[in-house]
Image (spheres, rainbow, N blue to C red):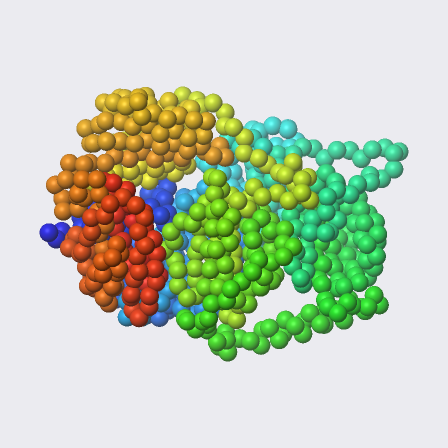
Amino acid sequence: MRAKTSVKTRTASSRCVSGFAGLLMLVAGLFVARAQDASLDTSRLPRVGGAKEIYASALTTIFTSPNPVIATAGAIDSALAAAGWQKYGAPAAATSDNPNMRMLSYKRGRQALGVFITLAPAQNNATSVQYNATPLANDLPFTNDATDIVYAPDRPSLSLVTAQPIDRTLDFYRKELASRGWSLWSRKLNAKEVADGPSGVVHERGAYADYVTDSKPTVALVLTIQAADAGKFKVELKEWPIKVLAPEPAKPANNGPRVLEAGPELSSLPAPKGRMQGSGTSSPSNRSMSASIDADIETVLAFYRRELAAKNWNEETASVAADQATVAFSTSDGSAVLKLERRDNLTSISLVQRIVKPPVARNDSVDALMKQALQMATQADALSPATRTPPAANEPAEALQALAGSDAPVPLPSTATNIETGDGKLEFDSTSGVQSVADFYRSVMKQQGWQSRRSVINNANMVVLDFTKAKKTVSFTIMRMGPKTNVSAKGSALESAVKPTDAVTASNAPVAEEPAPATAEDLQPEDNSGWPVPKRRTMVANEKTPFRRELTSEVPLRLTDVLGFYRKELGKLGWTEDNSKAVVAQDNAALAFNTSEGQAALKLTYKNGVTSVSLATRNPDALAKSEMAPKPGQAKLALVNPNPGEVIVTINKKTIKVAPGVGTKAPDGPSLDLPPGKYRFSVKQAGKSYSDEIAVGAGEVWGLMFGPGGALPMKVY
C-alpha cells in the first residue's frame, strides 16, 4: 500500500498524513518543537535550488541541498529575510568555526524558527537542512529595521539596534507590549499610565519605560533606549523585580552617608547586603560576580573600596562619574576591574578578577598585566580556523573523573576550564573530546539517579544529552569548537540550584507565584480543529494521524481551573468520563474518556504557574484494520531506513537487514512483534556500529528510525 502525500493539501493546525514515515515524522516533530497559536507550517518555508525533501510537517521539515553548508546557509538566510524573518542570536552564545555546521534562529511576528544546517554523510555528503518551529515562552517584539538582535525566547531578554527615533520606538513598544498583556507603568503616578500619557521617560542619554502585567505581579519589564553609533539607538528589554518601580528613597538628612554592610560573597568576591540580584562564576584563571542594588554609585564604591582593601587589593586607577565608575586593582595573584553603572534607580555591579600564575608582584602596573593578556590573546588568535585540525571521528575515548571542589549544581569533568555559572545556565570548555565528555555525563548522571531521554543529535562533533530526575531537567550540548570542546547546559535543575553563598539572591529573586483565579473570559472556549482550548493560553499544537490525535497547550492558570474547563467542555462534545480511572493531585491530573473517536486521555501537569495540557485520542478500530496492529498482549516495532545505505539491526536475538528507503513511504519495511519489556539492540550503519535500548508496552506501536546520528524510537500508538 503506497500513498501520495501532497504538501499543498496540508493544513497548519490539523494534519492527516499518509504513509508510515509520515506518522513517524509527525511524532518526531513533537520531540523537536511545539507550534504557537499563530501556526507555523515549516513545510511551506523557502528552500534552495536542487533541494530534495526527506520529510515535512508543520513542526519539522528536513531536506537536502547540493551546495556546501556555508553557501546553503547564506541562501536560506537571504530567502528567509526576504520573507520577513529576522535573525537573532542567543545571549552569551558560542560561535562555531566548523564549516560543516550552522545553527540559526529567526523570528517573524509571534512565530520563531530554528534552522540546523549540517553535512550529511548518510545522504552522500549532501547538506542537510532542518527547520524546527520554536516555542516562545516569552514573546518580545522586534522593530522592523532591527539589527544586532540578541534574544532569549525562554526568558524575557532582548537587545537590538534601531534607526527609529526615540519617540517612535517608545510608541512601538507601548502598542506591541500592550497586545501581549503588558501595561505601561508611570513612576510619577505610581500607577498604570493613562491612555493619553507619554510612552516613556526621555532624558539626555536616551529613554526608558516600565511595564507590568497581572500574570506576573512580582516582576517588571524595563525598556531602555541609549544612543549608539551612526545616529542609531540600542534598545534593551529585561525583566526586573517589581521593587525597581518603587520611587528612589530620599537620602537621610544630617545622618551622614549611607554605609552598606557585607553580605554573602559570590565566588569568593565581596557582595553588599541587600542586593536584589546576583550571580558568580569561578575558574582557575578568573573569578567574577555581578549584582544590582538600590544604592547610589558613591555608596557602592565606598563599600568595595573598604572590602577590597581588607583583602589587600591595591587600587591602581579610577574613573568615577555621577552614573558610572570603573576602578582597576592589582592583587597578590593577578588583577581586577570593578565596574558600576547607575540606571533606573539601581546600581549594577560587575567585578572580574583575572588570576595570573606565578603570582604577580604588587608593584606590577596594570599596563604590564594588560600587555600580558594581549599577548595571550594574540597567540590564541594565531591559531586560525584554517590551521586548526578537526577532531578525528574515531578519537580515543578518555575516562574522565569529576572535578574536585566544584560548587556547580551538576558534576564537572576534571578537564573543565573557563567555567561560568549563573542565571540557570552552565558553560565550560574542555580539552577532552566530545565523546569523552558525553560518556562522562552518561555515567555520572546515571550514578546520581538521573534518567536519560533520547536525543536525535549524537555524532562525532556534537552530542545533546537530556536528563530528568524528580521533575527537574537538565540538557547538555557538547560541541567541538576548534581545538577544544564547549559544553553548555540549561534546565530547571540549574535554575533551582542555590548555593549557601547565594541565600540573599534566592530570597530576593522573583519566584513563580500561584496565578490568580481564572476569570470567565480566561476560560472562554475557543475551537481548535473541533476540540476546545481556553482563550487564555500561550501555546497550542494539534497533530493527527490515522491512529491517534493529540492536542497540546500551555495555559497560565491553576490546574483546578483548567481541569474544570475541560470537564465542562468535553462533556458538551458528548464525551463520557470514566470516573473509576480519574487521578487528581495537587500538581497533576489524569482523566479517561469514551468518545465517538475512540478512547481519550486528558493529562494536566502544573509547574511554575503554568498548566500543561495533553488531550489525546486513540482509534483502535483504525489500527486493527491496518497492517500495523500488534498481536494481542504484544507490541509492534517497525524499522524505517531513510538513508541511501543498508542498515543491519540485531534485536531480540534476530538480525535484520533494512534496505535503503524502506518504510519511508508506506509500512513496507520489516517489523517485529515483541513481548512488553526493554530490548537492547545493535546497529551497523555506514561503516559504524552502535547499540541502544528501547522499552515497549503491550498494545503499543513503535517505529525505530535510523538517522545519521543514531536510532530514534518513536511511539506511533
**Residue in the picture at 29% in, 69% down:** 686
Asked which quadrant contains residue 537, the reply is top left
Q: Going by the image, does 205 lie left or right of 671?
A: right
Residue 683 on image: x %, y %: 29, 62
Where residue 437 sits in the image (x, y, percent)? 50, 61
Nearer the observer, 481 or 540 = 481
Task: Pinpoint residue 202: horizontal percent, then vertical percent.
Answer: 63, 42
Residue at the front extreme? Answer: 653
Q: Which of 493 and 172 is in front in this view?
A: 493
Residue 666 visible at all = yes
Q: Residue furthest left?
A: 1
Residue at (27% x, 44% y) in the render: 676
- Quadrant occupied by the C terminus: top left
Is residue 706 positioned above or below 375 on the image? Answer: above
> Nearest the camera: 455 or 9?
455
Q: Can residue 49 be seen in this view?
A: no
Left or right of 667 in this view: 474: right
- Above or below residue 697? Residue 42 is below
Q: What residue is shown at x 60% (from left), y 73% (from top)?
A: 380
| Residue 192 placement (x, y as % from top left) | 57, 29
Asked if residue 37 lies left or right of residue 306, the reply is: left
